[in-house]
Image (tube, helix red, strand yellow):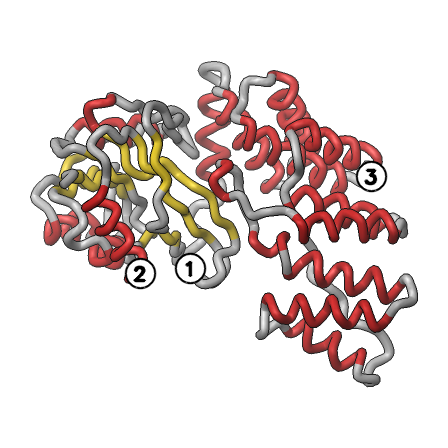
Amino acid sequence: MATISLCMIVKNEEATLPRCLESVQGLAEEVVIVDTGSSDRTREIAGRYTPLLYDFPWEDDFAAARNFAFSKATQDYCLWLDADDVLLPQDRQRFLRLKASLPPDTDVVMLPYHTGGDGAERPGLTYYRERLLRREAGFVWEGAVHEAIAPAGKVLYGDAAVTHKKTGPGDPDRNLRILENVKGKRPLLPREQFYYARELAAHGREEEAAGQFRQFLDGGRGWVENEKQACLDLAQCLGRLGRSEEALAALLRGLRYGPPGGELCCALGDHFLEGGQLPAAVFWYEAALSRPQDSRAGGFLCPEYYGYYPCLQLCVCWYRLGDPALARAYNRRAAACHPDSAVCRANEAFFAGGEARAASLPAR
């Protein structure tokens, strides 16, 4: 059976570290914890779970810290987690089955990562990450923030999900600060530029963000899933700037990468719905319902855009097109995806003959 070193980097994680380590008790042969400058009880808590506790002076580089943690591992595979990650009980069992059956020539194991939403039952976002890496393969983390390892060799996909359970906002400016510091010293890596653009957008610096997204896309050196996401993100920036036709061009650029996912289909549907082009909007929302949820492709997958959201938007479209029966049918399909949806209940009350207008729908 494969042996595992759990490798973590932490700083001021006293609120979440016990929960994380309890959730993975018994899964790894050793636990390596690297502290990057905690001022709370993090080190004391870590010491209850492992003697392998190291200090690493923080230098605004997550990849450097992770590489240091991996350098202290001694087992067959390195498993990485953040302090606000957990394995839920069902995923613990899946992980144990994976560990018992892992072929010895496996280099990388990709596992689902669930974030947002209400956890494993209905994650807001899901995507695969390189979660187990064969130590002797010598993989190296890259990227000052949103660090990653490009999978290589024999890659295996598993079903033991890691669930991200963030408990607070953290420092909203940290990543932007780090990336701007890096940018002042050297050219950003393509993945860093992608996330730099996203940070600029998150901070309301739309023009700068749009420029960075365009540079990233024109460079053609990014991971394809990041490029597909950049088209969506660029369109959102341009939309917020009121440049609708440029936003549409950014969305259409996303079609260069092959059949679209539900996210791009819904974005196109929204564009046409907002412009009053209802038949075109219907086409794209229906397309979203027809697309498979391919989380193994490597991009961010939002399950809402493959069922609940396009059904709600089709409810609106068909009502405005004069077919309330079909509109109601789509509302019920949306409710089947989210039985607790207040929007669906409000729409159903409207269709039953109550209100003056249909309930407004949530923004994308």
Does the image show residue 37?
no
Q: Is residue 265 left or right of residue 33?
A: right
Q: Circle 3 sits on which residue?
A: 244
Specify the amino acid type for callout 2. Gln
Tell me where residue 107 appears, x and y as whole percent.
Answer: 28, 28
Instruction: Judge whether 279 appears above or below 30 on screen.
Output: below
Disc 1 secondary structure class: loop
Q: Are marks 2 and 3 in contact (CB under 8 Å)?
A: no
Q: Circle 1 sits on which residue?
A: 120
Nearer to us: label 1 or label 3:
1
* Nearer the observer, 173 or 279: 279
Q: Circle 2 sits on which residue?
A: 90
Q: Earlier in the sequence, mark 2 or mark 3?
A: 2
* Nearer the observer, 182 or 282: 282
Q: Is residue 126 left or right of residue 87?
A: right
Q: Is residue 144 left or right of residue 289?
A: left
Disc 2 secondary structure class: helix
Tell me where residue 143 appears, x and y as whole percent.
Answer: 41, 26
Tell me where residue 305 appears, x and y as whole percent.
Answer: 63, 52
The quarter of the displayed image where residue 31 is located: top left
